Image (cartoon, rainbow, N blue to C red):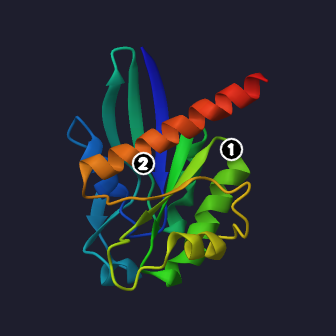
Amino acid sequence: MEIMRIVVTGPVGAGKSTFIRSISEIETVDTDRKATDETAQLKPKTTVAMDFGRLQFSPNMALHLYGTPGQERFDFMWDILIRKAHAFILLVSSHRPQDFRAARRVSAFMRHRTKVPMVIGCTHVDRPEAWPIQEIAIALGYLSPHGRPPMVAVNALDRFSVAEAVMTLIQTYAESQVTALR
């Protein structure tokens, strides 16, 4: 059986753990602990090592989803998880522009370590203060649509929405494989 490893990353509170819980066929493995720093202002618990979920994609293929901690002090886990990834999705909270800089740092960290395909998932797009996806792209440093990774709106609480984001990531991965063969 082929296993595709997908990393779900992004700043604190972007929806990484929820994203994995929404689509995993197994009970997710998590390392959530009580938040004791500024993260406690956003949520009571935070991931300190990783989340893990699994999805049987076809009879011969399973997806392993690894969620990173959002805090930069745990970037050693980012490094461990991204090294064997086939692709990754960067989740960004559309309603918290103060987190866009952190999202850029996470993305740069990952891109520095690997050249695997990525998709940007914009969460919380239903919030009144949410930024439009095109403006988020610019805030993340993608001034032109050319060369920009695919960007999708995703509701981390909705299994169907998460599945669409995963399908976009898998399609992006497949296209990168075809391009590599040329």
Q: In which quarter of the image is residue 72?
A: bottom right
Identify which residue is drawn at 52% across, 70% down: 133
First in sequence: mark 1 or mark 2? 1
How many marks can you see? Answer: 2
Marks 1/2: CA–CA distance:
20 Å
Which quadrant is the C terminus positioned in?
A: top right
In the rendered image, residue 35, in percent from the top left (x then y), is placed at 31, 73
User: What crowding class fits label 2: few (fewer than 14 Cα within 10 Å), some (14-19), or many (20 or more)?
Assistant: many
* Residue for point 50% across, 61% down: 74
Q: Is residue 145 above or below residue 111?
A: below
Residue 165 tag number: 2
At mark 2, the secondary structure is helix
Is residue 99 placed above or below 154 in the rendered structure?
A: below
Percent x, y of residue 28: 25, 43
| 175 is higher (above) or lower (below) than 70 | above
Nearest to the eye among marks 1 and 2: give it: 2
Image point (37%, 78%), residue name: 39
Q: Looking at the picture, tell me which residue is in the foreground, 97 or 48.
A: 97
Along the viewing direction, whichever of 129 and 56 lies nearer the viewer: 129
The amino acid type, in three-letter code, at marker 1 is Thr
Q: Quadrant of residue 18?
A: bottom left
Tell me the tag on residue 114.
Answer: 1
At 42% from the left and 43% from the top, the residue drawn is 166
Amino acid carrying label 2: it is Ala
x, y percent for residue 86 = 57, 35
Q: Is residue 84 visible?
A: no
Front in this rendered view, residue 12 or 100: 100
